[in-house]
Image (tube, rainbow, N blue to C red):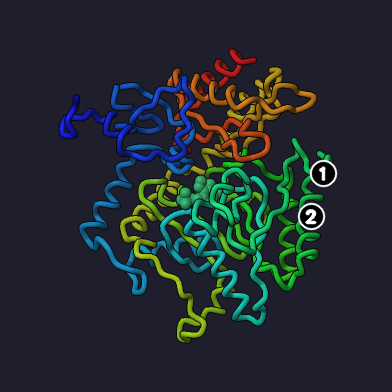
Amino acid sequence: MNTPMNKTLEEKDQSSLWHAFHRYHPDAVPFIAEKGEGSWFTDTNGNRFMDGVSGLWCLNLGYGQTELIEAATEQMSQLAYFPLTFGHQPAIDLAEKLDHLLGGYRTFFSNGGSDANETAFKIARQHHKQTGNPEKFKIISRYRAYHGNSLGALSATAQANRKMKYDPPAPGFLHVPPPYAYRSSFGNFERDDELTANYLEQTILWEGPETVAAFIMEPVISGGGVLYPQTSLYFDRVREICDKYNVLLILDEVVSGFGRTGKMFGHLHAEHFKPDIITLAKGLTSGYLPLGATCVKHSIYDSFKESSTDNHFRHISTYGGHPASCAVALKAIDIIERKEIVERVEELEETVLSELHQLSELSIIGDVRGIGFLYGIELVTNKESKQPASDATMKAIVAACQKKGLIIGKNSDTVPEGGNVLIVAPPLTSTEEDLRFLIGTIKEVIQAYS
Ligand code: PMP
């Protein structure tokens, strides 16, 4: 019997670490990651894997980016910590950079995506309270969206099975259907964008516009199965509706920010579209350090007069805007710009998508969709009825890819269809050879299951 002193790493892992989800398929061999380089990592047994989901869709620039590591080290030696009640250069420089990139936003920094969304909800409610609309408190989000794990962000998350063990959710959160042409909530493929947007307006009217504070959406629903509108009409209609009823439009760009969808930000797919609040995390630091950002239009910030204690934002986070995280984010943005990463994604996305589309012929494939380097492959048992593939099939496919050295994901079984979408989101720096391996492996595995 091992004493605690000579336990193996695997034994210590099994006895002491609480894993997120713990959703290993029996066929999947658990592994402990050890070292990463580019789009690849090795485990403690020396097995090599391509990370086809960029960690949790955050490691946009891949592993081993020396410049990011140096940025963190230099900043830590200079000033290891300082709260943002005062200021420090990396946070100021980063806020200014985001203001410039987004075009007119002031940033409140936090620790990650959930935190950035919580911050957005509080800003929205307080803004209305101090601009003569104290009854506006409701937050509308979309079914299948994921906005975070903390109770407010989870309440905006609209995937029933993910929440029910933590009921009741925070009051004041309600949901509307997202655009999802393949399974249109209105049974209308052609008009799905328009009808889903109209439903938002209807909901605001039913609830009473004087009670609705904000609408939050991801440009592309990622964890919920890679869902996005067919045209920018949806964005335009949503903007128009929010303006009409004085509802703040919050864009959750936690996944879609920093090149993931082939534009610097997901909302840039819709020309002239300006959200009121934009939340960022993940790719902001390329996953190298935790950081969240809530970027608020200057006109909304104007209702928070820092000189008056009545109006100031009563919100603080010890580590939000940590100097090392901000320094890494600045460097990550610099790399994206200097190495033209977004342009590269834009250039390669069609090739990857058209290769994946070749799978559409197979009986098991319901829909293949994708934008930038974010792809969803929806599996069914019957193309006509669109009966979703079983959870066992989905997990077996993910496990089979893993056996061949490729990590891919699937949406969680917290949606009614039971998690039948494979999700692929490789680092934006993946080489063409990496992408060929990714496509080849997925094709080979899926063909074997068809
Ligand atoms: N929003 C979206 C769209 C996400 O996908 C996630 C995380 N997967 C979050 C928010 C929450 O981010 P975090 O895990 O950093 O709190």
From the image, tell me which residue sits under label 1. Answer: 186
* Residue 340: mark in rendering: none
Question: Residue 432 placed where, x, y %?
Answer: 48, 27
Q: Secondary structure at mark 2?
A: helix
Which residue occupies 64% across, 64% down? 172
The C terminus sits in image quarter: top right
The residue lying toward the viewer, choosing from 175 and 276, is 175
Q: Is mark 2 within 8 Å of ligand 1?
A: no
Question: Residue at point 73% right, 27% down?
Answer: 387
In the picture of the structure, the residue carrying the numbered disc 2 is 199
| Residue at 33% over, 66% down | 89
- Badge 1 amino acid: Phe
* Separation (CA) of disc 1 from disc 2: 10 Å
Bin the neighbour count of mark 2 within 10 Å (Cα to Cα): few under 14, some 14-19, many 20 and up. some
Q: Are marks 1 and 2 in contact (CB under 8 Å)?
A: yes
Residue 220 is at least partly visible in this image = no
Please, what secondary structure does the residue beneath circle 1 have?
Answer: loop
In the drawing, does residue 164 fall left or right of residue 54? right
Q: Can you give x and y, in whole percent of width and height, for residue 133 in the image?
A: 67, 78
For residue 171, side relative to residue 8 (left or right): right
Examine the image and state in which quarter residue 394 appears: top right
